[in-house]
């Protein structure tokens, strides 16, 4: 062990007459600990929030949406076959998109109707958790539900979100009325198109917005209800690598040509994810100020230690210690304070970030409030993802700040004249 490091550790352990210096040392370590832990926890929660949100959005939505410019898609079977030969495309399924009003008893709500193919759709989109029922029961043909009366068995099926079911007050195998904004012409003028459907499934995507506004029909029932014939709105496409979506989308457009155009999940959610990334960077800068303040405390600690150890420094210089050696003693002392605080902060931050759900549940139960109400935020649980690259960056930035904080006091100590220091001793 270099003698400079040995002396710096002795200065940390020694019982000083000035207890105030020891208190400031402890507070500086605690400040670095809190700052590092806060950085790791907050960045972990924000990245976990972004990843969880992305997974849930990409579960209920496709990676790429292909549509026909200014019109509904009529030759979707031919287009679907052409997509299978494009590198990176795993699966595709037709969809129909429309808005409607759904009514049950005295309750009504606006919904987004999504027509889909029960056979193909599960390979492209994921509904989260099916609380009750199944997509296979969307079509009345081949539906086998024990105890269902004939009138209900003949109704086309509909799958709704758990929040929508709660708002309407409906349960499984109950009928609902759906009203389309595109009316039908009658002798009395345009009348809204109304049809009864049977609730054959209730899903839980984990996103309140989707669970309260989405309703799924079979492709055939959607075409009949909206009077579309054999046409669809477009094709949902799943690809192998979600980050290659722009490349695959351009390949699709090149192969199919006009009037087909493709939109990626990045295009459709650009503002949301850009805002999340910007917020994460801003939080990193703000929380780094905590570490910066704690690192500046090291300057005051070392200045007080230098003032207290003038005699020791003079004796060391008289025994042949160079100015560089004196400087290294106090640099090592400052870095030791920073390293201890950083290490403890890393351990605390990673431990809390990896168990954030249990910690949040404990606080919620203790104080009787909910961190993330589902009707206000996108997610109802507090997610966390520890990126160890970010942890390494935090450690490096903290240690660099601590090192810079040691330079001035160490330089002042190295410039001490031993004759002046020992004159009155």
Image (spheres, rainbow, N blue to C red):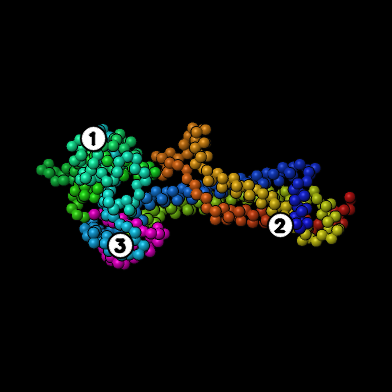
Can you tell which quarter of the image residue 378 is in? top left
The residue that disc 2 covers is: 407
In the visual, does 110 lie left or right of 12?
left
| Secondary structure of residue under mark 2 | helix
Magenta stretch: give its range. Answer: 232-260
Mark 1, Cα crowd under 10 Å, few <14 / some 14-19 / many 20+, is: few
Mark 1 or mark 2, which has the lower sequence index?
A: 1
On the question of residue 139 being in view, the answer is yes
Q: Is residue 251 covered in magenta?
A: yes
Query: Are the residues flagged by discs 1 and 2 in contact, CB closer than 8 Å?
Result: no
On the question of residue 182 being in view, the answer is no
Percent from the top left, x then y, of residue 98? 26, 48
The residue that disc 1 covers is: 147
Mark 3 or mark 2, which has the lower sequence index?
A: 3
Using the image, determine if residue 375 lies above or below residue 245: above
Mark 3 or mark 1, which has the lower sequence index?
A: 3
Mark 2, Cα crowd under 10 Å, few <14 / some 14-19 / many 20+, is: some
In the visual, does 410 lie left or right of 32?
right
Viewer-proximal residue, 272 or 14?
14
Percent from the top left, x then y, of residue 246? 38, 62
Can you tell which quarter of the image residue 137 is in? top left
Percent from the top left, x then y, of residue 312? 83, 52
Task: Please state the total of marks drawn on the protein image.
Answer: 3
| Secondary structure of residue under mark 1 | loop
Residue in the image at 39% along x and 43% along y: 206
The residue that disc 3 covers is: 84
């Amino acid at each position: 062990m270099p003698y400079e490091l040995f002396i710096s550790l002795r200065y940390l352990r020694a019982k000083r007459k000035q207890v105030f210096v020891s208190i400031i040392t402890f507070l500086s370590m605690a400040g670095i600990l809190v700052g590092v832990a806060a950085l790791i926890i907050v960045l972990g929660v924000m990245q976990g929030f972004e990843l969880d949100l992305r997974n849930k959005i990409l579960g209920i939505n496709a990676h790429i949406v292909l549509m026909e410019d200014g019109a509904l898609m009529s030759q979707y079977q031919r287009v679907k076959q052409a997509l299978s030969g494009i590198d990176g495309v795993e699966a595709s399924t037709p969809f129909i998109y429309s808005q409607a009003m759904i009514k049950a008893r005295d309750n009504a709500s606006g919904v987004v109707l999504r027509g889909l193919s029960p056979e193909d759709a599960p390979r492209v989109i994921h509904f989260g958790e099916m609380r009750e029922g199944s997509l296979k029961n969307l079509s009345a043909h081949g539906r086998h539900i024990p105890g269902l009366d004939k009138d209900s068995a003949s109704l086309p099926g509909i799958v709704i979100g758990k929040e929508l079911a709660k708002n309407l007050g409906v349960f499984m195998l109950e009928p609902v009325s759906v009203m389309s904004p595109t009316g039908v012409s009658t002798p009395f003028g345009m009348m809204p198109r109304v049809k009864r459907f049977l609730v054959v499934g209730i899903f839980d995507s984990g996103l309140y917005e989707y669970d309260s506004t989405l309703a799924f029909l079979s492709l055939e029932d959607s075409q009949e209800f909206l009077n579309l014939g054999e046409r669809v709105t477009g094709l949902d496409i799943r690809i192998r690598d979600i980050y290659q979506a722009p490349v695959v989308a351009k390949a699709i457009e090149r192969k199919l040509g006009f009037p087909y155009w493709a939109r990626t999940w990045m295009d459709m959610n650009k503002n949301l994810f850009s805002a999340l990334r910007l917020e994460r960077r801003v939080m990193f800068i703000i929380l780094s100020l905590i570490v910066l303040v704690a690192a500046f405390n090291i300057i005051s600690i070392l200045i007080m230690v230098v003032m207290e150890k003038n005699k020791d420094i003079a004796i060391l210089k008289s025994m042949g210690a160079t100015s560089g050696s004196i400087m290294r003693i106090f640099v090592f002392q400052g870095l030791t304070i920073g390293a201890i605080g950083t290490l403890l902060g890393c351990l605390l931050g990673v431990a809390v970030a990896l168990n954030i759900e249990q910690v949040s549940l404990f606080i919620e139960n203790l104080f009787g409030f909910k961190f993330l109400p589902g009707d206000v935020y996108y997610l109802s649980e507090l997610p966390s993802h520890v990126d160890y690259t970010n942890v390494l960056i935090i450690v490096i930035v903290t240690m660099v700040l601590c090192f810079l904080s040691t330079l001035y006091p160490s330089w002042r100590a190295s410039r001490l004249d031993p004759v002046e220091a020992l004159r009155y001793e």
